[in-house]
Image (cartoon, grey):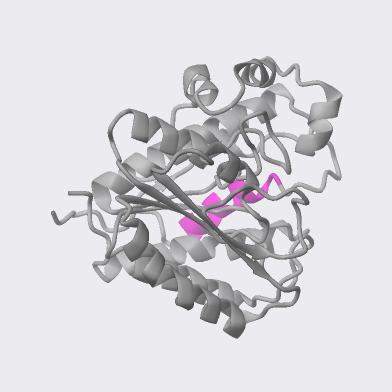
Amino acid sequence: MPTSRALPPIVYHPAYSAPLPPGHRFPMQKYARLAEILTEEGLIGPEGLHIPEPASFELLAAVHDPDYVRLVLNAAVPQNVERVIGMPVTQGVAERAQAAVGGTLMTARLALRYGLACNTAGGSHHAGPKGGAGFCVFNDIGVAARAMIDAGEIRQALVVDLDVHQGDGTAFIFEHEPRVFTFSMHGEKNYPVRRGPSDLDIDLPDGTGDEAYMAELRAILPSLLKRVAPDLIFYIAGVDPHESDRLGRLGLSDEGLAARDAYVLETCLPAAPVVGVIGGGYDSDIDRLAHRHASLHRAAAKAWRSGLARPAA
């Protein structure tokens, strides 16, 4: 079914950039700057940005401990839990987490309709059934995939997680759910210490560069798509495998990240609609970091113009 849209849908919410204490190491302002860059580069179609509804308590509690969800929504998370998350859970941070989850759910439904859609946030893969961790308050892909499976919108999902850190929270959420296949390719010696039970994990040694990274990905992804036969693919395009990322330890260049994103979309889109989320990235220069995250959206625009995006049957 052809579409007259000039570019793939992009989802954004002003709440994505919540206030944090001065000097906090999480680069919260990258989300707002990313939306600006996408406008500057002409990557947003004439329909504009899609603004999501925040995720409801019921959606969040279908994946996370309901008591934990209540604490977050009331901005009453204990300090020991905030330490695990890595940031204070203020009302603004809680609203941001709800908006990001709602954003990925909207992105997934747009992907089913158009074949490809991207969020300007998402990929909070360390949040698990019991609560948040590693700068992740709620697991947006976990909530979105759960909601869509329960509603009968999809039958089989594949998570392609290329953030530099293992997607432990997503793995624990779907440990006993065969309708969600979790694949994570990440740094072997990086966070988290306790790994989740992914369906497929690939550990990469410190310093892995463009050539070795792409060789590993090319050896895995095509056969994985045939094996899983998904009707929706969630792609976490973390830019923290970059050689200059503060929390990365791998050695990808800007060109390597761009080649990775292009390859994932070129390979996945003929198999199923793709939901792109930006994942992690921890450069201290917000402008440089946001430009790096825009690699996903540039690759999506190119794949769209090449006619690769196909709506769900």
**Does residue 34 belong to the magenta stretch?**
yes
Which residue, as the protein is rendered here, is positioned at the far left?
1
Across and down, in percent, residue 59 comes to 47, 24
Q: Image check: 146 left or right of 66?
A: left
Query: Which residue is found at the position 26% from the left and 50% from the top?
Result: 114
Q: Is residue 51 visible?
A: no
Residue 127 in the magenta stretch? The answer is: no
- When asked about the image quadrant of residue 282, the answer is bottom right
Horizontal and vertical percent position of residue 58: 48, 18
Query: Where is residue 95 drawn, in percent x and y?
Result: 61, 26
The N terminus, quarter of image = bottom left
Residue at (49% x, 62% y) in the render: 296
Coordinates of residue 212 in the picture (x, y in percent): 60, 82
Instruction: Give above or below for 155 relative to 152.
Output: below
Q: How many marks?
A: 0
Is 64 placed left or right of 304 in the picture?
A: right
Residue 222 visible at all: yes
* x 64%, y 63%: residue: 186
User: What secondary structure characterizes most of the magenta part?
Assistant: helix
- Please report the residue visible at 76 percent of the width from the left and 68 percent of the height from the top: 249
Residue bounds of the magenta highlight:
28-40
Position above or below: 18 against 296: above
Q: Is residue 290 left or right of residue 141?
A: right
Q: Nearer the viewer, residue 32 or 108?
A: 108
